[in-house]
Image (cartoon, grey):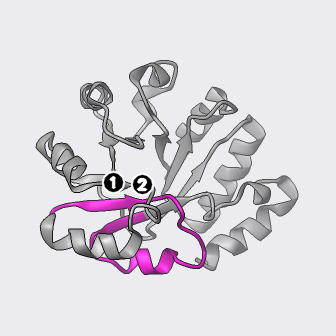
């Protein structure tokens, strides 16, 4: 899968159908084609199913640590799965179900391992703690075929420096669509916030 502009990836935990409807309205209004719903304790499977049914949205599932987390989800509607590290079982599961797998990496050894399994779109996490912009610049010449999805410590103050790098395909995080804006009376504020990115 190729992430195309805009290269912003809202990363959210959606805990209800109401939140899912609001999120859908917001991201459809600004034309963001990708969303990553993280699997945390408060996530709503019904909300994920609702988001998956919407047009013009490529749904990704994040914080995937094992295949058990995926078993109750609408697998045939999910476009990509993101892990904080590499899990061989998740990789095979995604391949069998025609889902893009984006494993997380932090070191050169981890990048080499992921590439050996055929993955060139990788999650660089936690981006800021792992060396940030300078490390990505250093990795570019060593791994010219790799594109990074960057999350972790990225915010409104530094995200533009990331998306300017040729080996960064997207930046993600809660800063793109903060939870406090996902309220019925803040939809217009959220749309304005996203339009400023």
Callout 1 crowding tier (Cα within 10 Å): few <14, some 14–19, many ≥20: some
Name the residue beneath numbered marker 1. 106
Q: Is residue 169 magenta?
A: yes
* Mark 2 residue element: loop
Q: Which residues are magenta?
A: 144-170
Instruction: Name the one closer to the observer, 87 or 3.
Output: 87
x and y percent of residue 159 in the render? 50, 74
Is 12 situated above or below 127?
Answer: above
Q: Is residue 93 magenta?
A: no
Residue visible at 53% across and 38% down? Answer: 52
Name the residue beneath numbered marker 2. 125
State how far apart marks 1 and 2 are (Cα).
6 Å
Is 36 situated above or below 9?
Answer: above
Report whether 142 appears left or right of 100. Answer: left
Residue visible at 40% across and 64% down? Answer: 170
Callout 2 crowding tier (Cα within 10 Å): few <14, some 14–19, many ≥20: many
x and y percent of residue 184 in the render? 84, 54
Report whether 33 appears left or right of 67. Answer: right
x and y percent of residue 123 in the render? 36, 53
Q: Are marks 1 and 2 in contact (CB under 8 Å)?
A: yes
Instruction: Name the one closer to the observer, 142 or 71.
Output: 142
Question: Is residue 4 visible in this depiction of the protein?
Answer: yes
Residue 149, by quadrant, is bottom left
Residue 54, by quadrant, is top right
Question: Is residue 1 visible in this depiction of the protein?
Answer: no
Residue visible at 33% across and 28% down? Answer: 90
Is 146 situated above or below 89?
Answer: below
* Mark 1 residue element: loop
Q: How many marks?
A: 2
Query: What quarter of the picture does the C terminus occupy?
Result: bottom right
Residue visible at 61% across and 48% down? Answer: 12
């Amino acid at each position: 899968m190729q992430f195309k502009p805009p290269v912003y990836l809202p990363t959210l935990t959606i805990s209800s159908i109401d939140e899912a409807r609001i999120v859908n309205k917001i991201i459809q209004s600004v034309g963001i084609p990708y969303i990553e719903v993280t699997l945390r304790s408060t996530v709503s499977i019904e909300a994920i199913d609702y988001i998956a049914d919407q047009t013009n949205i490529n749904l990704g599932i994040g914080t995937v640590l094992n295949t058990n987390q995926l078993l109750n989800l609408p697998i045939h509607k999910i476009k990509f799965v993101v892990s904080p590290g590499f899990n061989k079982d998740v990789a095979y599961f995604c391949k069998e179900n025609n889902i893009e797998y984006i494993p997380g990496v932090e070191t050169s050894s981890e990048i080499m391992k992921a590439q050996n399994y055929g993955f060139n779109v990788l999650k660089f996490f936690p981006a800021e703690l792992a060396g940030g912009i300078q490390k990505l610049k250093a990795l570019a010449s060593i791994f010219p075929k790799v594109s990074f999805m960057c999350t972790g410590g990225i915010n409104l103050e530094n995200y533009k420096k990331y998306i300017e790098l040729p080996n960064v395909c997207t930046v993600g995080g809660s800063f793109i669509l903060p939870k406090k804006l996902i309220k019925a009376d803040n939809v217009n504020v959220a749309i304005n916030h996203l339009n400023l990115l």
